[in-house]
Image: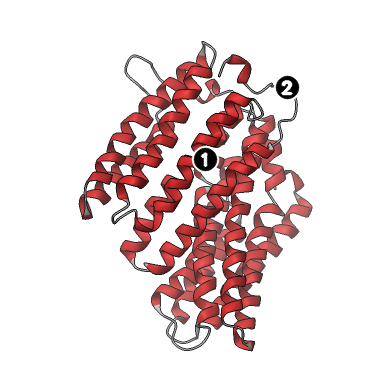
Amino acid sequence: MHTGALRPRGGEQRVTFTELFFDLVYVFAITQLSHLLLGHLSWRGTAQTLLLLLAVWWAWIYTAWHTNWFDPDRPSVRVVLVAVMLASLVMSAALPRAFGEHGLMFAAAYVAVQVVRTACSVAAAPRGPLRRNLARVLAWAVLSGAFWIAGGLAHGLSRELLWAAAVGADLLAPWVGFVTPGLGRSATTDWSIDGAHLAERCQLFLIIAFGESILVTGTTFAAHPSPVAGAALLTAFGASVGLWWTYFGSSAEAGSRMIAAAEDPGRLARSAYTFLHLPMVAGVVVSAVADELVIHHPGGHTAPGTAIAVLGGPALFLTGHALFKRAVWGRVPRAHLAGVLVLAALGALTPLVPPLALAACATATVAGVAARTAVARRGEPQEG
């Protein structure tokens, strides 16, 4: 790789077929995570799944930043992406037993993704702010990598604590500018990104998450077809459409325009896209788990885990989307807050109604938020 590997600036930078091919591995990763949560629907299982989701997202989003700087159509960059793709495939395969016998395999694959890709970025970057910034990112990747590998070698609670420390380092790094002794600290203005391209990448990852939700819905219904399951299928599909409409019908394109025109696109890329798209992705993953639970058991008693998934998935998504809109436009939409409050209040119905009825209430709430957002956009198109 050489300095000619950088993406040209000045024109519209679209997502390439290389990047779309790379994303296929993360379709598998999201499927693995939803199945993991479904099989371990407890507080500890949820915390473990969240920790692994953070790692998967971090591996993907840093690669999205990499392809924002470096041209994926260059052979040298493409080779790096293929290598990262292979390591990501190993990482994804290890997810179901990451807290068991595959812990070291997961950790080693994750660290390889982060360290090798970033080292190649440093080697390819021209002398100047970008190379110094990437050198700082590499230093933090090595630091968190030490905790990941140590956790992979440990067992039980020790692994969980070490990996929590590793995730903490990964999350802290961008907020402190990847400050590194001898290398200084990065400012968001040093990152010189193409904001519209990064926005499109994050939007595509959300599509991956929605795809998993649709896949789970269809597969579960195919295995248990019945009129009641059909009603549950309709409810689950309606919730997916409502969440999709809330984001893509109101703020996706407007957010892309905002970050493209921002004086400091790196700041918005860090907050609105790198961090605040994560709760939306998590919300869709949790909703996919809820869809499978409700279609499989639409009647009878509503278990606490089912209720949390049914109500918590949309609530996570709406909270993340509200914070995203606040980061971009400076205010939280009231419809989202009302939706989250209604979903929380619906928890009181858990002992009284079957899973299908609770899911129908959650879907109606999401539909109401989507409708209110669509109406508001007609009057204020610039605010998404």
Q: Nearer the viewer, residue 119 or 50?
A: 119
Q: Vertical placement of 291 versus 146: above or below? A: below
Marks 1 and 2 sit apart, C-alpha to C-alpha, by 29 Å
Q: Secondary structure at mark 2?
A: loop
The N terminus lies in quadrant: top right
Q: How is the image coloured?
A: secondary structure
In this picture, residue 196 sits left or right of residue 97: right
Residue 330 shows in this picture: no
Marker disc for residue 10? 2
Q: Which of 92 and 180 lies nearest the eye of the viewer? A: 92
Residue 240, x across and y down, in percent: 63, 65
Amino acid type of the residue that numbered disc 1 sits on in the rendered structure: Met
User: In percent of the image, x 66 and y 70: which residue is there?
Assistant: 238
At 60% across and 44% down in the image, what residue appears?
Answer: 202
**Residue 85 disc label:** 1
Going 61% across and 41% down the picture, which residue do you hit?
328
Residue 54 visible within the image: yes
For numbered disc 1, what is the local secondary structure? helix
Q: Residue 2, image x and y in percent? A: 57, 15
Inspect the image, locate mark 2, and give the three-letter code of the amino acid beneath it: Gly
Q: Earlier in the sequence, mark 1 or mark 2?
A: 2
Q: Give the foreground label among 1 and 2.
A: 1
Give the residue at x 46% y 87%. Answer: 352
Badge 2 crowding class, 10 Å Cα cut-off, few under 14, some 14 to 19, many 20 or more, is few
Is 293 above or below relative to 155?
below
| Residue 284: assigned label | none
Left or right of residue 378, residue 230 in this image: left
Number of marks drawn:
2
259 sits left or right of 157 in the view = right
Within 10 Å of the Cα at label 1, are there few (<14), some (14-19), or many (20+) other Cα atoms? Answer: many
From the top left corner, tell me how far across and down residue 188 is, in percent. Answer: 52, 26
